[in-house]
Amino acid sequence: MTDLPTFTLAIVGAGPRGVGVLERLSANAADLLGDRRIAVHLIDPFPPGPGRVWRYEQSPLLRMNSMPEDVTVFTDDTVRIDGPIRPGPSLIEWTRQVRTGTLAHPVPDGLRAELETLAATDFPTRRLQSRYLEWFYRKVLAELPSGIEVVAHLAAAESIDDDETVRLSDGTTVSADAVVLTIGHLDALPDPGERVLEHFAQQHALAYYPAGYTADVDYSAVPAGEPVLVRGFGLAFVDLMLLLTEGRGGRFEELACGGLRYHPSGAEPVLHVGSRRGVPYHAKTGYRLRGKPLQLPRFFDQHAIKALPGPLDFRADVWPLIAKELAWAYYTELFTAHPGRVRMDFAVFADKFADLAWGTAEMDALIAGSVPAAEDRLDLEKLDRPFAGRRFDSGEEFGKAVRKYVEADLARRADPHHSADLGAFMALLSVIGQLPVLLATGRLTATSQVSDMDGWFHGFFSYYASGPPPRRLEELLALAEAGVVSFLGADVDIAADPASGEFVASSASHPDTVSARTLIEARLPSASVSRVSDPLLRRLRDAGALAEEAVPDVGGVPLNSGRIATTITDFRLLTAAGTPHPRRFAVGPHTSVRSAGAFTRPRTNAVSFRQNDALAREILRLANP
C-alpha cells in the first residue's frame, strides 16, 4: 500500500478548548486514524493550555468563580461519547497530587502558599488554574500516539488562503489540509450606541472604555478620586472593582465581628455601577446538597422537548418546562433535607407536582399549601428582577436597599438552611446540557432563540449560577461603606450631555443622576460577526468564507444571531453562500453549535466534551476516509 502523506491540521486557538480537541484526537486515533499520520499545529500568541484568558501573566488578585472540586478537563463515565473515556484529576485532585509529590509539575514560588492551603470549596486564583491547564497540555503531549505530532506556534493566525495555508503574525505559514477555529469569545468593535458615546468622548476629551475582557484592558489612566460610571454588574465588574481598588494599593481588613473594612490608598476612583437589574450576580453557595439525590433531568429532557408542538416561543412554551425543572430540584431538596419546614410528605407532593403545569393557579396553590414560609418558596420572577417596579426617593436610599440585598444574599448562600437554592443551581446546569436537544429540533422562532434563549435566559443563568465567590461581595460591601463604590440603579441609562460635556447616568430606581468624565463598559462584548475585531475573522468574513449565523424562522425571515455560522452536526464553517466548507471547522460558545463558556463540572456529561469528541472523530475520518 502506498504511504499517504502526513495530514496537517491547524488549530487556531490553543486554550482549553483547542487542547481539549487535541486530547480527543489523541484518544480516538487508535480507532480511526489507521496508518495515516497527523501533524497538528496549535496556533496562539498565548501559551498553549491556558491560552489568553487563563494565562499566568495576569493580576494575582483575579480568581476563578468556580471551586476546584467543580473544575475538570477530563472525561468521565457520565460523558456520552463515541470515543474512549480518559479520566483524570479535577483541579482539586491535581492540587493535592502536586502538593504531596504524587504528581510532579513545577509551581512558581508565588503560588506555593496557595497550593499548600487550597481546599475543595475555596476559589483558586486564575494563576493556579493556569498551571493546571499547562500540566494538562503537557500530559496530552506526553500521551500522543505515534501517528500524531504537535507543533506549537506562539503567534496569531492572520489569514487563511483558499488552499488552507494559514499565515501567521511572525511571518511563517502553515500549509494545512484542515483548519479548526477554537477562538472562544469574540472581541467586537463598539455597536452603534457605543460608537455615539465613543465619539462624544473624543469630542470632549473624555475617557470611554468599550466592552472587553477586563484583564486585557489598561485602566491605568482612570483618574484617582474622580467619579467613574460603570455599566455592568457581573463578573467583569468584579474584576474591575479589584483592579481599581486593592490593585491600586488599598487594603481589606478582616473584622473580628465578621465582614471586611476597606482602607483606601488614595489612588482609587469612585465607581458608580449600574446594570439592567441594578444588583450584582448572586454569590456562589458555600454548602452541599443534604437531601434525596436529585433526579435530573426530570421534566426538561429530550422526550419532553421533542413532544413540544412547534413553532416554539421560548418564554411561552419552553420556559415553563425549565421553570418546573428548577422548581422540582429546589423542592426536592427542601422537602427531603428540611422536612420540618413543609406540610406534606414529599412523595405526595411529588405526585401532585408532576401532574401540574408551572405557572398555573393549581401549582401555586400546591406550593402555598405545602410550603408555609414565603422565603422557602421559589419565586423566579423576583429572583430575576429583584428591584423591578420599585422606586426610591434618592440614590442614597436605593444604595441602602442594595446593601441589604447583598447582605441577605451572602447570608442565604452561606446557610445550609437554604440548601434548596443549590438544588435549583444543579437543575440549571442540567438545563444547559439539554439546550442542544432543543436547538436540534429547529422549532424555536428566530426572535425567541436570539433574544430569549441566547439573551435573557443565558443572562439569568449567569446571574443565578455563575456569580462570584462570596468574598467578592463582602469586598463590594466594604468598598460601598468606604465610599469607593455606589449603586446607580436598575435599567441604568447612560447619556452624552452636550451641555456639561460629560456622561450622565440615570436609572429607573430613583430620580438622582451622576455625571462623570469616564465611562467603563464592564462586560464582555456580545457575539457579533459583523463587528468582530479579530483580523483573521474579519478577513474571512469580508472574503465570504465565514458568515454570521442566520437563525431560520417559521415566517421565512431569518434573524442574525451574531454568532459564527456552522453546521450543527459536524461543526463545519458555513460560507456567506450558506455552503459548508469541507475542510474548515469552528467550535465554541459563539458558534451555531452553542456551548457554555465555562469549565466543566465533573460527572455532568458536559456538552463541550461531547462536542470535542464528535469534532475530533470527524477530523480523523477526514484524514483517513
Image (cartoon, helix red, strand yellow):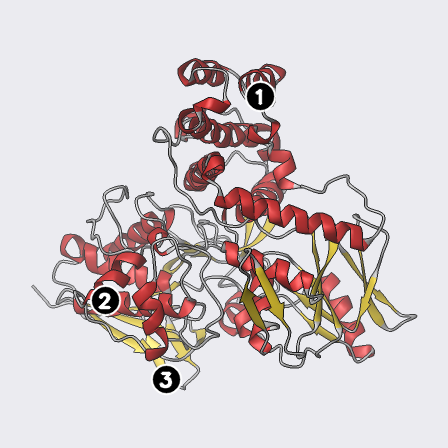
Residue 388 higher or lower than 504, as above or below? above
Q: Position of residue 355 (x, y in %)?
A: 48, 14
Among the two numbered marks 2 and 1 on one chain, the one whose residue lies closer to the N terminus? 2
Residue beneath the point at 34% across and 71% down:
113
Q: Residue furthest front?
A: 256
- Looking at the rendered image, the disc whose residue lies closer to the viewer, 1 or 3, is 1
- Quadrant in which the C terminus appears: bottom left
Q: Residue furthest bottom?
A: 171
Q: Position of residue 174 (x, y in %)?
A: 33, 77
Please, what secondary structure does the residue beneath circle 1 have?
Answer: loop
Residue 356 higher or lower than 229, as above or below? above
Q: Nearer the viewer, residue 619 or 433?
A: 433
Q: Amino acid at mark 1?
A: Pro
Q: Which residue is mark 1?
A: 372
Q: For the residues marked 1 and 3, what is the alpha-carbon distance in whole angstroms?
A: 69 Å
Image quarter of residue 378: top right
Contact (CB < 8 A) between labels 3 and 2? no
Q: Nearer the viewer, residue 19 or 371?
A: 371
Answer with left or right where residue 287 lies relative to residue 468. left
Which disc number belongs to residue 172?
3
- Looking at the rendered image, the disc whose residue lies closer to the viewer, 2 or 1, is 1
For disc 2, the neighbor class at 10 Å (few under 14, some 14 to 19, many from 20) is some
Which disc number belongs to residue 273?
none
Q: Which residue is mark 2?
A: 98
Residue beneath the point at 44% across and 35% down:
423
Among the two numbered marks 3 and 2 on one chain, the one whose residue lies closer to the N terminus? 2
Q: Position of residue 468 (x, y in %)?
A: 52, 55
Q: Position of residue 309 (x, y in %)?
A: 52, 24
> Could one spot residue 529 in this view of the protein?
no
Q: Amino acid at mark 2?
A: Val
- Quadrant in which the N terminus appears: bottom left
